[in-house]
Amino acid sequence: MNKAQAIDAVRNMLQGPRAFEAQRLDRIHAAMQPWTARNAIQHVHVKGATSEDHPLAPLALRSQTNYLPLVLDTFSQSMKVDNYFSGEGKETAAPWKWWQKNKLDARQTGVHRGTLKYGVSYASVLPSMIAGKDDAAFIRGMGPRQMTALYGEPMEWDPRLDSPVDDDWPIMALEVKGPMIRLYDETTVHFIGTKAQPQSALGWRDPTYINVNNFDYIEGRKHGVGVCPIVRFQDRMLLDDDEEVLGIIEPLIAIQSRIDETTFEMMIAQYYTSFIQRYVIGWMPESEEQALRQAASDAWFFKDPDVKVGQFEAGDLNAYLESRTSAIKDLSAIGQVPAKNLGLDGISNISEVALAALEDGKERKSAEIETSLGESWEQVFRTSAHITGDAESAADFQSEVKWRDATARSFAQTVDGLGKLATMLDVPVESLWEDIPGWTKAKVDRARIAADKRDFGIVPDEDSQTDDLKKRADALGVLIRAGVDPEDAASRVGLGGTEFTGAIPVSLRPLAEEAAALEDKGGL
């Protein structure tokens, strides 16, 4: 792809696929953001109200009760990759080192949250493109608002290859960050700059921004991966007829809007009808003073028999509360989020078994998403191995990632179950350590090293060395105080070769008159 072709490809993707995706992505992004004084009244759909000067605008701003970020947190916090096993056994595969070097223990969160939020996210896997640098794999996550990728048919038969061609790799991918654009293809990363940028991705359809003169080709760098080095993460991998990019947030936006509107209407009722209001028909106070005196009086008296007095009862908020609770339950059911996580009442003092049952739906959904994400991470690892020349790991399609266990089970219950596996089914104990809640790969490795030292009598740990040395020193002191020659005593307790300073222990110090002759008085 030459310079002109690269710029044409960028222009076509900006005004086509990227602008098309932007409408949906911006809608999801806006649903996760807090309202402002300027747009709050628009979110609650008050007829004819569009300005922040509307008298109900302050109530609208305070009525937002956004559960969508909480739903996202609930799932993302339980999705952490903890290890990568080779296909030949339960051993950590070699490409795991690139996970550690790219700090993906922390950065995986961004990839997972982007996938859960929008339904898709991406990771670039590139070698060092600087001359003289050693082979290394650089992995970087990107969200769909930053990257757009074009894929071919999900499966097509190529008679030249006599095998199906899948869509694991995109034809090309576009990354936009401010005025800088990167275009990835199967051979090169093209760096392109823009002179002017629209405020949103939809603005690229404007001829002012999409004009060819608005783009400058900076350089192209060969990456040598052999494919477009972008890996796609999806929350679900569906068939062609059912292909939808949803994520977990988009299906809940309408229900969240219902919760916000119900809260807004409840706040209006609370603000205007919370107190009992009295009225008088057929009488008007002659002065403000008379009106205040009448309002403060416990009893009102009128001469005119036609005067009618009554009161407006305080508004009943129970209907609003029930409607709001119903909407939250709908969000909990459709999102498969435990009701207790959304603050619903009536769930307290439950057993561990009941708690696990409440989270069953969430765990099933998480497991389905982890299966899809796991395939993408395995593709990242194999690509990293290919980039660094590890052909064996690059061809290891039996490898798999291990997810950290975050299920709602007590520690004692889990350990008891693992113990029964070891004793009743003769499962090797070491293979069960990975399933202990809270144990990371690093902790399992330390436990295995300590077990090897214990089993084979290798160098004991520091505390054991200190205790052993103290015991030998105490035994040496006992022998010396008993009159045994110090060097002979040291040899007997296993401290042979110890150098003695000649100092006399306090317990063996001679009498003062005998010690006087041993002191060096010095010359004056």
Image (cartoon, grey):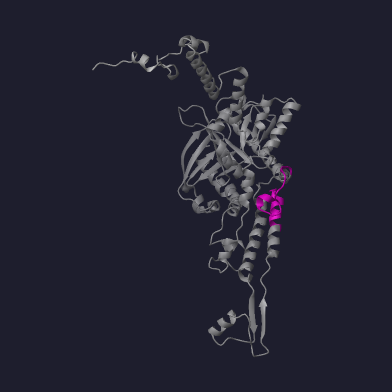
Residue 521 image-quadrant placement: top left
Residue 406 image-quadrant placement: top right
**Is residue 331 found inside the magenta-colored segment of the image?**
yes
Q: Nearer the viewer, residue 511 or 473?
A: 511
Could you tell me residue 381's position as x and y percent?
60, 31
Quadrant the C terminus occupies: top left
Could you tell me residue 251's position as x and y percent?
67, 51
For the magenta stretch, what is the residue range?
A: 326-353
- In the image, residue 447 above or below residue 303: above
User: Left or right: 504 with respect to 425?
Assistant: left
Could you tell me residue 32's position as x and y percent?
59, 52
Could you tell me residue 106's position as x and y percent?
55, 38
- In the image, residue 34 above or below residue 443: below
The outermost residue toward the front is 513
Does residue 167 appear in the picture of this structure? no
- In the image, residue 397 above or below residue 257: above
